[in-house]
């Protein structure tokens, strides 16, 4: 019978070889505290002040999602605006001009112009550039909102975010 010597443990004890180093926790804690500091500094409350028609009453929400600025389409009881530019007139939430079925010609022309300007500036649009921030009065009827959204989708703006009041 032969007995072999047991292998050395990777953990250092008082009588073993000093080849194994110690773990320096100070440097790791410094890195962790720097990462935590920059994370907290970059994570702030995001707010966006929207300037639109004074008569627009937004629906309320308790959502905590952040709001990224994109193309804004505002619909009030008296008008339709793209980026604060008047596009169409409304009376009590209904369009004054003739609307071709489910589409609004003046909105379609304005959105095509805005899209062409954005494509001229950027070779390829990012996903954030293709999102419509829909600012709609809570008193609007669904038919009006539906026509605006279908017209936006027809031009190529198929993603929507709805502005709400907290």
Image (cartoon, rainbow, N blue to C red):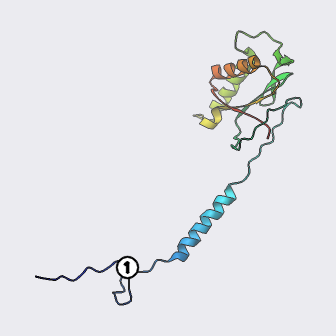
Circle 1 packing at 10 Å, graded few (<14), some (14-19), many (20+), is few
Most foreground residue, 71 or 161:
161
Which residue in the structure is indicated by mark 1? 11
Q: Nearer the viewer, residue 100 or 19?
A: 19
Q: How many marks?
A: 1
- On the image, the x and y values in percent for residue 85 come to 81, 27
Q: Where 163 sits versus 37, above or below?
A: above
Q: Is residue 109 visible?
A: no
Residue 71, how many percent across, how many down?
A: 71, 32
Residue depicted at x 68% and y 23%? 152
Residue 38: percent from the left, percent from the top? 64, 61
**Under tag 1, what secondary structure?**
loop
Q: Is residue 58 left or right of residue 119?
A: right
- Give the residue at x 71% y 44%: 64
Q: Is residue 62 left or right of residue 14?
A: right
- Residue positioned 69% across, 41% down in the render: 68
Which quadrant would residue 106 be assigned to in this image? top right
- Residue most toward the left? 1
Q: Judge from the rendering whether residue 22 lies leftward or rightward of residue 57; answer left or right.
A: left
Relative image position of residue 60 (x, y in whole percent): 79, 36
31 vs 66: above or below: below
Compared to residue 14, the image places residue 97 above or below, namely above
In which quadrant of the rendered image does the N terminus lie?
bottom left
Quadrant location of the C terminus in the rendered image: top right
Query: Can you say whether 141 is above or below 26 in the image?
Result: above
Furthest-right residue in this view: 54
Q: Kindly give the residue lying farthest to the bottom in the view shown.
A: 15
Hey, which quadrant is residue 133 in on the image?
top right
């Amino acid at each position: 019978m032969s007995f072999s010597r047991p292998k050395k443990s990777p953990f250092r004890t008082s009588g073993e070889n000093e080849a194994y180093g110690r773990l320096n926790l100070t440097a790791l804690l410094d890195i962790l505290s720097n990462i935590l500091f920059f994370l907290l500094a970059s994570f702030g409350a995001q707010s966006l002040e929207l300037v639109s028609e004074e008569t627009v009453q937004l629906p309320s929400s308790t959502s905590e999602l952040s709001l990224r600025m994109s193309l804004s389409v505002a619909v009030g009881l008296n008008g339709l605006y793209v980026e604060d530019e008047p596009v169409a007139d409304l009376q009590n939430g209904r369009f004054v001009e003739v609307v071709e079925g489910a589409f609004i010609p003046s909105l379609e022309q304005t959105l095509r112009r805005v899209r062409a300007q954005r494509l001229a500036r950027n070779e390829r649009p990012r996903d954030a550039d293709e999102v419509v921030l829909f600012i709609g009065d809570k008193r609007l009827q669904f038919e009006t909102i539906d026509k605006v959204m279908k017209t936006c989708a027809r031009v190529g703006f198929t993603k929507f975010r709805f502005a709400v009041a907290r």
